[in-house]
Amino acid sequence: MAATKTIPIVMVAGAPLQSGFIKSLSEPGGNVTGLSGMDAELGGKRIQVLRELIPNLNCVGVLATTTTTDPFSQPFVADVQAAAKAANLRASPVLIGGSSELEEAFSLMAKDGAQAVIVQGFFGPFAGRIVQIVNRHRIGYMSTDRSAVVAGGLVSVSANFPILYEQAATFVDKILKGENPARLPVEQPSIFQITVNNRTVQALGLSISPTLLAQIDEVID
């Protein structure tokens, strides 16, 4: 967006409305359109899943970037805080500038009594390292992408990103056929994924309730 205000840009994820990329979902108003991942709108569902996994849950950590590093952290953290408050839980957000501060961030959350942490997608590439750290603190790691669960994280709740990328092609097709991106409504996902790592569940002394099992799309053993 900084590079061009005229060449059409098709996005696939993020929080375009909260981040100020578009004027509205129904009429973006500029050269950006595509899909929202609703990643800053799933706090309620993420809290619900964590409460199913951790019945005595009372404090949820949030690992996010500073807004200088990534402005998306603001709506992401606000969404989790609002969901935690609605569920009568305490939120413990820690904002950091990058991966060099991971150890300190989790130490702070552990001292604050966090039993689980919801991690901003920005830190997905560091999932393996985060798994090692949370294992030491015995904190449940909830990610925004299943790849972190494959790496040993506890659980993820997210849009189905492969489907979103497929849908993005339809926007490209429409624009190449002459449609104006300013008037192409931004679409939101209708399919979401819950992935749980059963080995991590057992290692934390937790269990998957029948109610949660009915909602889970994938259990990794």
Image (cartoon, rainbow, N blue to C red):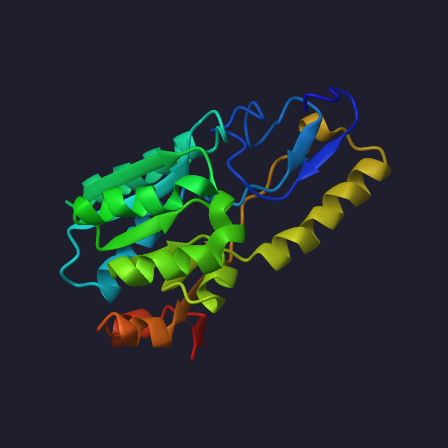
Image height check: is 198 above or below 101?
below
The image quadrant that residue 67 belongs to is top left
Residue 49 visible in the displayed image: no
Taking depth in this image into account, of 41 and 205 the one nearest to the observer is 205
Q: Quadrant of the C terminus?
A: bottom left
Relative image position of residue 6 (x, y in whole percent)? 78, 21
Image height check: is 144 above or below 70?
below
Which residue is rendered at x = 27% and y = 56% of the image? 48
Using residue 74 as the reference point, say whether residue 60 is left or right of it: left
Using residue 193 as the reference point, say whether residue 118 is left or right of it: left
Using residue 29 as the reference point, say whether residue 123 is left or right of it: left
Image height check: is 138 above or below 167?
below
Q: Quadrant of the N terminus?
A: top right
Relative image position of residue 23 (x, y in whole percent)? 56, 22
The image quadrant that residue 138 belongs to is bottom left
Relative image position of residue 98 (x, y in whole percent)? 47, 38
Which residue is rendered at x = 35% and y = 49% of the image? 118
Relative image position of residue 31 (x, y in whole percent)? 71, 25
